[in-house]
Amino acid sequence: MRLFVAIELSERTRGHLAVVQERLRAVARDASWAGRDSLHLTLKFLGEVRDDRVAQVCEALNHVRGESFEIVPSSLVCFPPRGPIRIIGAQIGVAGPQLHGLQQAVEDQCAAIGFARESRRYTPHATLARCRRPLRAALRQRLADSAAGLFPGEPTLVERFVLMQSVLDSRGARYSVAAGFPLAGGH
């Protein structure tokens, strides 16, 4: 099964990001927009994982420790950082080191059971849209102008992280929670 580790965003945060998406649609008409219910913050993409390894992944993730903390969409971000745009996202901000500490702990636990470490620097974001055909780099400013005044967004109190399953079908990816892992102070 196709798995990744993520933070679920609150209803208020997803509602705010849906407003951002609506504002940006006119600029990026050809983009494939993420559904409101599928908006999340990925900590680690695992890819295809054999069914018989899922329990091992859950056991490793049970060893991740951290305190609850708050995150907030802080700005619009496009990937890659230069050149044609492939992904439009909302940069996620946090006041302290908890988010990067959590992501690093997840990375370490997954590496300990044989998953390759991510080579790129972690840039916390919620993917708002993927561009089937890359958008011209010149549209970055128009996207930023369209999102003006919409950031910072609504906060999410992070009290747990999840192992998420992704199922691809004709409508795109559908996500479901395979397991949840509470943080200290969480439920």
Image: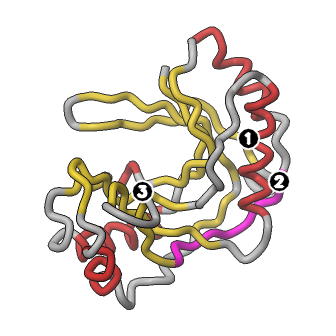
The answer to which quarter of the image holds residue 95 is: bottom right
Label 1: how many Cα within 10 Å (few below 14, some 14–19, many 20+): many
The span picked out in magenta is 66-74
Kind of residue sitting beneath label 1: Glu
Could you tell me residue 59's position as x and y percent? 78, 25
Q: Secondary structure at mark 1?
A: helix
Residue 97's place in the image compared with 162, above or below, is below
In this view, the residue in front, 132 or 137, is 137
> Which residue occupies 77% across, 23% down?
113
> Which residue occupies 69% across, 27% down?
115
In this view, the residue in front, 109 or 141, is 141
Label 3: how many Cα within 10 Å (few below 14, some 14–19, many 20+): many
Could you tell me residue 48's position as x and y percent? 51, 21
Give the label, 2 or 3, closer to the camera: 3
27 to the left or right of 152: left
> Which residue occupies 52% across, 61% down?
125
- Residue, disc 2: 66
- Residue, disc 3: 127
Could you tell me residue 92's position as x and y percent? 56, 68
Question: First in sequence: mark 2 or mark 3?
Answer: 2
Q: Which mark is residue 8?
A: none
Find the residue positioned furthest to the bottom.
149
Q: Secondary structure at mark 3?
A: strand
In this view, the residue in front, 141 or 8, is 141
Could you tell me residue 14's position as x and y percent? 42, 64
- Residue, disc 1: 107
